[in-house]
Amino acid sequence: MKEALKPLKEIEIHQKSYHKVKSRIRFLYKNYENEKIIVDLFEYWIFSLRLIYCSYGSNGLRGYFRSKQKDPVVFSYEYEFGVKTNLVSLATKINAKWLFGLISFFPLNLRLPGSPNTYFFDRLRVKRTRLMISAIPIYTDKTLENNVVNIINLYLSETGIDVELDDDVHLYVPSIFKSRQIARGDTRTLSIRCAPVELMHFNGDENIFLIKNKLKVVGFQHGGGYDNIDLDLALYFEKKISSTFYGWGLSEFNIHQHRFAKKNNQLAEVASCKSRVLWIESPRDTKLIAYYYPLAYAIKKDNNVVSYIFSELKESGVKYYNKPYLYELQSDRYIGKRGEVIDGNKKAEDVIRKGDLVIFDNCMHSLIYYCIENNIMFIIVSCKSMESHYSDEMREWYEVLRRNNLFFFSSEVKLLRNKICRLSSNYTIPKDVADYHYNKFINI
């Protein structure tokens, strides 16, 4: 687990180096209505340059600047694994000044994916926001662009990276950092509701902050793992660009999760299908992910956890199934340890049924919330060393699961198998846990 704390050194290096350029960055955008958010996004992006270098060296950093893929995370999957993840798509760009003027004439609050867009008008507002973004006229400011590249070179030099950026790199600096503020609009404050990570993809959505209206980001959790543990660099920046941030139960402010729907046909499923023990696999991650999510990465790389689950399942004698991750992101940690494999190209939420016992090999899987929403029994296995890094809210939840023998450490030989054998296909979540989940994650 010591390996997981290496990013702390990189944070220190970044903070010292960024301190030397921050005032210059703020000066560049001092007349922009959304100066703070642009500067915060700039910090995330420039820090990502440092982390790309740490992960892949000077060739990787140059490869990033030569790539049309501006999202550092998606680039890492393409560069390291040679796969197209389809995790992020470029925002459509039509650059129509007249259309932007027409849409912005009626200033309405904005929405992007990741916010609770459950109603028709919410989804309509997402489409309107996307259309507005696509029509934003982008005017590159060459002086600003040159200043940005000079700052990048200075920052990289301060962090000990000897990679001088040439003129071609200018083309691949995200437009938000090298463009003039849009003259159209007014100083009224609007809100934009979204998962903040949508704005950190640098796929074009972030250009919304070039408009003259001051925008407040109302941020929402978009997957599992938020506020479970105490070291999460990506979440730090998501919260930094948000005026308010809502989690799914473990954060300071919370709302009921909106990603997974409650199934209405589960009684029929239970009657027609046998209960199963279903092991949900974690994906393989890139070296860059290890810097953004160091503890989460360490958990998913801990082979002791996978070996423990395999051994306990084998010794229990129960028939079990594995649900691999989608497509090319399947991890090879499970080779030789899988039970009967369920189609890896189906979404796991379309596979998990009421009455199943679901096993997770980390406490940050998004599908845990699917199980909570549908009152499906699950067990979490983790490594003991992670316990000291739990947030207060995670510790409270963990203690409820531990009391009910639904959370195990990989050092606890025989305990998981004994639990599975005692259940004997009676995979019904205990009332104590169900009540806690309802109050903590649903009725909020």
Image (tube, helix red, strand yellow):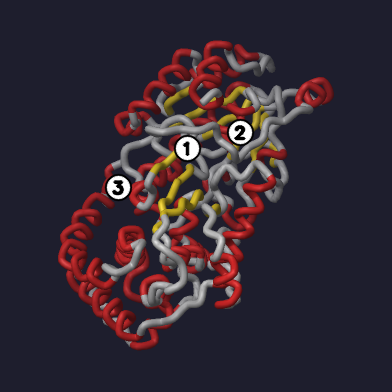
Pinpoint residue 68: horizontal percent, then vertical percent.
Answer: 50, 76
**Mark identifier at residue 42:** none
| Residues packed near mark 1 inside 10 Å, few (<14), some (14 to 19) or many (20 plus) | many
Q: Nearer the viewer, mark 2 or mark 1?
A: 2
| Residues packed near mark 3 inside 10 Å, few (<14), some (14 to 19) or many (20 plus) | few
- Check disc 3 and give the amino acid type: Glu
Task: Name the residue: 60% across, 21% down.
Answer: 316
Task: Name the residue: 48% across, 29% down.
Answer: 381
Secondary structure, mark 2, is: helix
Report the side of 263 relative to 324 (left or right): right
| Distance from Cα at disc 3 to Cα at disc 2 | 31 Å
Q: Which residue is mark 3?
A: 3
Pinpoint residue 163: horizontal percent, then vertical percent.
Answer: 27, 78
Residue toward you, 59 or 303:
59
User: Eyeballing the image, is 114 above or below 434?
Assistant: below
Which of the two discs, 3 and 1, labels the residue nearer the N terminus? 3
User: Eyeballing the image, is 244 above or below 433?
Assistant: below
| Residues packed near mark 2 inside 10 Å, few (<14), some (14 to 19) or many (20 plus) | many
Q: Quadrant of residue 54?
A: bottom left
Q: Which residue is mark 2?
A: 370
Q: Which residue is mark 1?
A: 364
Report the side of 117 relative to 12 (left or right): right
| Distance from Cα at disc 2 to Cα at disc 1 | 12 Å
Q: Quadrant of residue 298?
A: top left
- Check disc 1 and give the amino acid type: Met
